Amino acid sequence: MKKLNVFFPVPRIYGPSLHETKNKLFEYGKDFAKEADDWIDADVIVLQLIGDPDRKNLVHPSEVVFSDLIKVIMDNMNHIPTIVFPLCNINNTSNWRYLFENASMIYSYLDVDYQIKHVDGQLLPFVFNKSVVVREPLGVEPGDFFREDDMQKQYLIYTFGFDKETESIDIIFDATVLFNSTRENLGLPILKMLHSGRDFGFDSKYYQFETPAPQNQKGIVRARYNSSYFANALRADAWVEGGFEMANIEAPLCGCQPITYNFECYQHWFKGISEFVNVPLNTDPRSLSNRKHVVEQLVNIFNRGTNGRDKIYKYTVSVNDSDDEDEKTKEIGSKLDLFDDKRNMIYERFLWENVASTFWKEVLNKCAK
């Protein structure tokens, strides 16, 4: 079978997870596709989209401006099949309209039909001329995230981010302080919040900062999950913009419980995996009317998840046939997991190998010449 030439530009300003998405799709799609250097050589074009298309971002592998490239691609969509891959923050502009209405396929983890047809709750007259909408998740590598049995829980919650409001980091800190005030009254040791990203300078009594891990150093992130009871997946603006939050599928593989909001984009994928914080439909978790209630729910989740944890969750282990005790210990240590059911759900839904296979099958079915 002839491999498809696929042009898959990614703006350099986009976060590392977007570049990883592209890399994983090509890694597991090597039997189906190879990367084209330019759109003019492509059998298929794939566009990951975030936010305003007019931002002047350079793209990789070429060095053209993304907004200029988009205009060229839109002029050629009728004879080069184009896949639109929206990620978030697409519902506040109609500038993407032509792309969505004329794409060969729209592929996303979002409820795309709602996201692109509604702005501030108002229905927009989008008409899909030929687009097929496919809703599928992102993936995770089990070799990158797993339970390390020799690591003890040292931190209450691991958070990552650069915007304390958007990623609910300030709310989590408030909940951490309130949770620990009770522990201190009972004579129990403080469980700090562990944060990486931008240092917000919170009270070090309840907060520890560590520098962000390089993208290729998954072991650092894995260790942070392993040493924390909880992981932050509380992206506040997802009630409008949608989202996925990789912590929902990375953290449980490390015996760390993700916490996220009860937004549709998260419930659709992570029901049975994540702890949900409830906010009223179509309201901002950061509003004065919601913030106190969110903090109270977080404290309740913290109390449930740290009280007698070892008694609540049991280890399930697999032992190999080796007679060497060191070899047995190594084998057991690699498979210990506090979240067996969650891990199995993640393996069934979110392995990159399976996600990529589905993606390329859809591409071949919908877009191949």
Image (cartoon, rainbow, N blue to C red):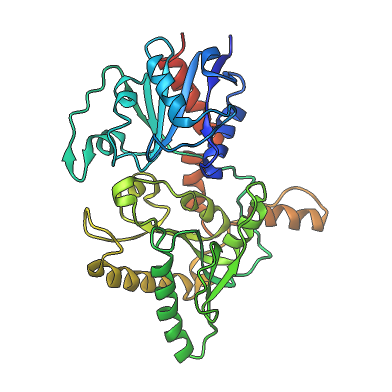
In the picture, measured across the screen, residue 265 lies left or right of residue 360, that is left
Instruction: Mark yes or no: residue 147 visible.
Output: no
Instruction: Mark yes or no: residue 241 visible.
Output: yes
**Residue 216 x %, y %:** 66, 46
In the picture, measured across the screen, residue 113 lies left or right of residue 66, that is left
Name which residue lies at 48% across and 60% down: 257
Rendered image quadrant of residue 78:
top left
Rendered image quadrant of residue 140:
top right
Q: Quadrant of the N terminus?
A: top right
* Above-or-below relation of 88 to 283: above
**Residue 179 x %, y %:** 42, 79
* Above-or-below relation of 22 to 272: above
Rendered image quadrant of residue 242:
top left
Name which residue lies at 40% across and 74% down: 175
Residues 368 and 51: in front is 51
**Residue 277 x %, y %:** 33, 62
Q: Residue furthest right?
A: 324
**Residue 326 x %, y %:** 81, 57
Residues 53 and 298: in front is 53
In the picture, measured across the screen, residue 129 lies left or right of residue 138, that is left
Name which residue lies at 45% across and 69% down: 305
* Above-or-below relation of 201 to 99: below
